[in-house]
């Protein structure tokens, strides 16, 4: 599966959701999450994110390791997002 990591926090550019063929992005208040049971590892979203927030779980930088579980937990509690919306405009990860 792929994982949305800290750079998404306070950004939410949402370019990722538009290219996802399986609609596996879920919207939290401050960032998006990928549902691990739905992601097919197509990688389409990875180059779309302007702040490089999306990683394959095997390439997830060590300092963001907890985001793997966070994505799994939060994706199942948040509403699905399939259309681009206005970004939050914050500094990535702050
Ligand atoms: Fe977040 Fe990047 Fe998508 S900032 S909402 S993972 S395009």
Image (cartoon, rainbow, N blue to C red):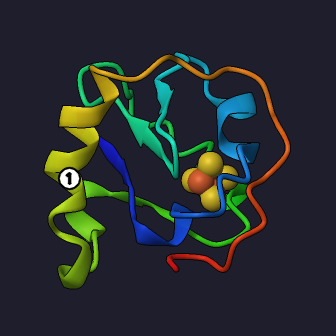
20 is higher (above) or lower (below) than 60: above
Which residue occupies the extreme right position in the image?
86
Camera-side residue: 85 or 53? Answer: 85
Q: Position of residue 37 (x, y in %)?
A: 24, 21
Rendered location of residue 76, percent (x, y):
27, 20
- Where residue 33 appears, as percent x and y from the top left, is 41, 40
Residue found at the far front of this picture: 29
Asked if residue 8 lies left or right of residue 18, the reply is left
Quadrant of the image occupied by residue 84: top right
86 left or right of 37?
right
Q: Which residue corresponds to mark 1?
A: 68
Q: Position of residue 78 (x, y in %)?
A: 40, 23
Residue in view at x 66 percent, y 62 percent: 11
Per the image, label 1 sits on a secondary structure element best described as helix
Residue 22 vertical position relative to residue 59 in the rendered view, above or below = above
Picture residue at 38% right of the left edge, 27% below the top: 40
Give the residue at x 75% y 30%: 18
Q: Is residue 1 left or right of residue 44?
A: left
Residue in the image at 15% along x and 63% along y: 66
Nearer to me, 17 or 40: 17
Q: In the picture shown, does residue 19 fall above or below 64?
A: above
The quadrant the N terminus occupies is: top left
Identify the image quadrant of residue 52. Answer: bottom right
How packed mark 1 is, by other alpha carbons closer than 10 Å (few <14, some 14-19, many 20 or more), is many
């Amino acid at each position: 599966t792929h994982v949305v990591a800290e750079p998404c926090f306070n950004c939410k550019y949402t370019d990722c959701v538009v290219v996802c063929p399986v609609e596996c992005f879920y919207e939290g208040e401050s960032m998006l999450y990928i549902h691990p049971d739905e992601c097919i590892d197509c990688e389409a979203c990875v180059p779309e994110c302007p702040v490089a927030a999306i990683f394959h779980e095997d390439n997830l930088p060590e300092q963001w390791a907890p985001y793997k579980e966070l994505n799994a937990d939060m994706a199942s509690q948040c509403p699905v997002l399939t259309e681009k919306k206005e970004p939050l405009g914050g500094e990535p990860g702050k």
